[in-house]
Image (tube, helix red, strand yellow):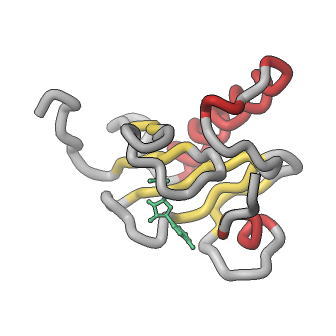
C-alpha cells in the first residue's frame, strides 16, 4: 500500500495530539472531531483497510480495542458510553487508507437508525 499521512504521524514527523502510544498502537485526537471526544486508534503497521487484516493480526486488532477501553477510561467517558467505528472503502466512507478505529463519545450520539 502507499503511505498515508498517518505514517508521518507514527514517525512523529507531523504533529498530532497523541493520547496513547505503545509498541504496536498509536492513538491521537481527530483533526476534525465529530464529538467532544474523537480519537483515532491506529496500528503502527500499515494495514490499508479491514479487508486487508490477516488472521495473524487478530491479536493486534484486539489490542486496538483494549487501547480504546483504556482511552475511554482516561477521557472519563467509559461509564456514559461511546462508539467504536472502523470505516472500510467507499461505502464505508473511508478517506485515509491506513486502517483506524474511531473512538467517539462525550455526548449523546444518535442511534444508527436515526
Ligand atoms: P475515515 O473517514 O478514513 O474513517 O476517517 C479519517 C479521519 O482522519 C477523519 O475523521 C479525519 O478528520 C482524520 N484526519 C485526516 N487527516 C488527519 C490528520 O492529519 N491529523 C488528524 N489528527 N486527523 C486526521
Q: Position of residue 78 (x, y in %)?
A: 45, 38
As drawn, 25 above or below 56: below
Q: Position of residue 58 (x, y in %)?
A: 76, 22
Q: Position of residue 105 (x, y in %)?
A: 36, 48
Q: Position of residue 19 (x, y in %)?
A: 63, 61
Q: Nearer the viewer, residue 40 or 91?
A: 91
Splitting the image into 4 quarters, where does residue 6 fall?
Answer: bottom right
Q: Nearer the viewer, residue 84 or 107?
A: 84
Splitting the image into 4 quarters, where does residue 63 fall?
Answer: top right
**Left or right, 104 with reference to 61:** left
* Residue at figure coordinates x 53%, y 65% from the top left: 29
As drawn, 114 above or below 12: above
* Residue at figure coordinates x 46%, y 37% from the top left: 84
**Left or right, 105 with reference to 31:** left
* Residue at figure coordinates x 80%, y 27% from the top left: 57
Q: Nearer the viewer, residue 3 or 62?
A: 3
Q: Nearer the viewer, residue 42 or 3?
A: 3
As drawn, 24 above or below 36: above
**Left or right, 40 with reference to 47:** left
* Residue at figure coordinates x 75%, y 59% from the top left: 2
Amino acid at each position: 500500500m502507499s503511505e498515508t499521512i498517518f505514517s508521518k504521524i507514527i514517525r512523529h514527523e507531523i504533529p498530532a495530539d497523541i493520547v496513547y502510544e505503545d509498541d504496536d498502537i498509536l492513538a491521537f485526537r481527530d483533526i476534525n472531531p465529530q464529538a467532544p471526544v474523537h480519537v483515532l486508534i491506529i496500528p503502527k503497521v500499515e494495514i490499508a483497510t479491514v479487508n486487508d487484516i490477516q488472521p495473524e493480526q487478530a491479536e493486534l486488532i484486539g489490542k486496538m480495542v483494549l487501547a480504546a477501553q483504556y482511552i475511554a477510561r482516561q477521557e472519563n467517558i467509559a461509564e456514559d458510553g461511546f462508539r467504536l467505528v472502523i470505516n472500510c472503502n467507499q461505502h464505508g466512507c473511508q478517506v485515509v487508507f491506513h486502517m483506524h478505529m474511531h473512538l467517539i463519545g462525550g455526548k449523546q450520539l444518535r442511534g444508527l437508525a436515526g
